[in-house]
Image (spheres, rainbow, N blue to C red):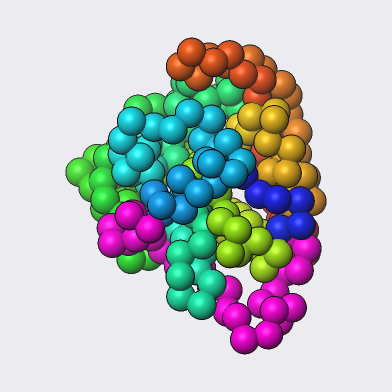
């Protein structure tokens, strides 16, 4: 969940003395990420329902790479890339056949090092899931809003997917209007709407496919 003004400032230069950066998520970041996600959940309702095991939610075997945004060295945002699965709406809209996810742990460069991944620990190779991957677990805390953290995290994820020869997709709850505004500002292409069952909740999802290049 991103507020509408996230990405508009675009650089830490708009906030003298504060530094925005992105880096690969490490195992030692997980507790901070869980605390940050709890803040976002209380304020913005993401995730829709608080997971029974939030560390597992952020470290699910579907995820093969993850990054954090930091402001003055403090974790302030998160994004991950996931293997596309048959439960995701966007691949269904595109008619993509998906494979089972591979497991692993996150290393310093954002890669998931595990037992079932592709050579080099990426967790998915072009073709494993129809040559696509999903943006997942994107959230930004209040401390990073207005710094362009959402834009920076999306840029990181998109570049990493392109380097792997993967095209990036995402599904977003229709109520997450600020996140939708960010994606559309960045040039993501709307591909359709669908209904999904998230536990006890039936939700409307909007699906997007990444542009070949993010807008400035």
Q: Residue at x 33, y 30 (%)?
A: 52
User: Residue 187: where, in percent of width, then height?
Assistant: 77, 49
User: Residue 34: where, in percent of width, then height?
Assistant: 39, 49
Residue 82 colored in magenta in the image: no
The answer to which image quadrant residue 15 occupies is: bottom right
Q: Residue at x 58, y 79 (%)?
A: 19
Front position in the image: 101 or 35: 35
Left or right: residue 6 versus residue 138 is right
Q: Residue at x 47, y 47 (%)?
A: 37
Location of the N terminus by quadrant is: top right
Asked if residue 81 shows in the view, the reply is: no
Q: Which residues are magenta?
A: 7-32
Residue 30 colored in magenta in the image: yes
Does residue 29 sit above or below 87 in this rendering? Answer: below
Front position in the image: 86 or 153: 153
Residue that protrudes farthest toward the bottom in the picture: 17
Does residue 157 sit above or below 86 in this rendering? Answer: below
């Amino acid at each position: 969940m991103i507020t509408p003004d996230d990405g508009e400032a675009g650089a830490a230069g708009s906030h003298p003395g504060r530094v925005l950066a992105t880096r690969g998520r490490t195992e030692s970041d997980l507790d901070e990420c869980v605390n940050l996600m709890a803040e976002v959940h209380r304020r913005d309702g993401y995730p829709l329902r608080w997971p029974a095991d939030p560390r597992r939610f952020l470290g699910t075997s579907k995820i093969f790479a993850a990054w954090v945004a930091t402001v003055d060295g403090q974790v302030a945002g998160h994004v991950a890339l996931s293997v596309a699965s048959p439960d995701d709406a966007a691949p269904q809209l595109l008619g993509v056949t998906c494979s089972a996810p591979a497991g692993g742990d996150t290393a310093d460069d954002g890669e998931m090092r595990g037992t079932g991944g592709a050579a080099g620990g990426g967790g998915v190779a072009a073709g494993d899931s129809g040559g696509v991957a999903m943006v997942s677990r994107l959230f930004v805390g209040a401390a990073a809003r207005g710094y362009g953290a959402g834009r920076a995290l999306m840029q990181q994820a998109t570049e990493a997917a392109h380097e792997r020869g993967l095209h990036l997709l995402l599904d977003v709850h229709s109520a997450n209007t600020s996140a939708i505004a960010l994606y559309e500002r960045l040039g993501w292409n709307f591909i359709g709407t669908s209904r999904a069952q998230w536990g006890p909740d039936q939700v409307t999802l909007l699906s997007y496919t990444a542009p070949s290049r993010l807008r400035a």
